[in-house]
Structure formats: C-alpha cells, structure tokens
Image: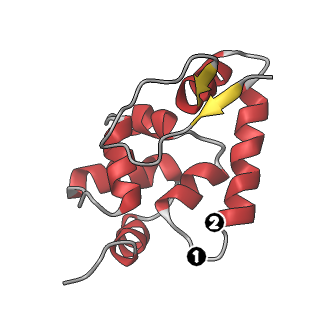
Amino acid sequence: MPIVWLVFDRSIQPPVPEGLVDVDELAAEFDSDPKMRPLMEQARREIAERYYSEETSLAFLRLKRGWSQAKLAAEAHTSQSHIARIESGVADPQLATVMRLAHCLDIGVGKLAEILARGRDEP
C-alpha cells in the first residue's frame, strides 16, 4: 500500500519526498488501469454523494458521473487546470465553455450557469 503525498496549495510544487507517491499520479495510474478504473469511478460517485450532495456544484456533477477533472476536461475540450479553476471559483468560464460543460454533464446551460454563479464570490 503506497503512502501518498498531497499538496493542497497548487501554486507551489514541492518535490515528493522519497518513499511517498503523489496522489494525483496515483489516481492517474488507477484511471489508466482497466481493472481499477471502475473502482475509481465508483469512489468518485461515493465522494459526490457523501461530501458534495448538500449543494449542487460543478464538482458534484462531475463526481456523480465518476469522472476526474481530467476526464471532464477531455470531454469538454479544455484543460484539467481550467476545470480546477472553474470548480474553485477562480476562473469565470466563457459561454462556449459553459455550453460544452453543460452538454458533457447533460444539464441545461442556464442551470449550469446558475450553479457556477453560486460558486463565485460576487462583488
């Protein structure tokens, strides 16, 4: 069983200490393994229900499908880092991006725009 390394502040990238495994690299490895992928998808769905079901968010919609940020990014033709910035409320996506995300997540554009607006700090 590997011991994982997790950095919450993505603005810094310290080296992974010897003997530890970066959690993102481990998740990517499991996502690429056909035997582990269904387990990762199920784990994401469980996380959605357990930790995100109080209020609908982009992360909840993504996790409910069992998708990683990288998977949603690939489906929506954008980058994983852009999805992360949208989910955290740092990025304000363009309408074209919202439309692609809505299509991927099978939700109306207006409903997704409302969800995204709720997640942003209003001036």
What colour scheme has been applied to the protein in the rendered image? secondary structure
* Residue situated in front as seen by the camera: 112 or 38: 38
Badge 2 amino acid: Tyr
> Left of 86 or right of it: where is 35?
right
Q: Looking at the image, is 81 positioned above or below residue 113?
A: above
Q: Residue at x 65, y 53 (%)?
A: 64
Which SS class for mark 1?
Answer: loop
Q: Quadrant of residue 77?
A: top left
Crowding at mark 2 (Cα within 10 Å: few <14, some 14-19, many 20+): some
Residue 25: image location, x then y, percent: 55, 23
Q: Quadrant of residue 122?
A: bottom left
Q: Looking at the image, is 57 positioned above or below residue 41?
A: below
What residue does disc 1 label? 55
Which SS class for mark 2?
Answer: helix
- Quadrant for the N terminus in the image: top right
Q: Quadrant of residue 109?
A: bottom left
> Left of 41 or right of it: where is 32?
left
Q: Are marks 1 and 2 in contact (CB under 8 Å)?
A: yes
Residue 120: image location, x then y, percent: 32, 72
Q: Residue at x 20, y 56 (%)?
A: 94
What residue does disc 2 label? 52
Residue 4: image location, x then y, percent: 65, 31
* Residue situated in front as seen by the camera: 121 or 11: 11
Q: Residue at x 59, y 32 (%)?
A: 23
Total numbered circles = 2
Mark 1 and mark 2: span between their CA atoms? 6 Å
Residue 55: image location, x then y, percent: 58, 76
* Residue situated in front as seen by the camera: 44 or 25: 25
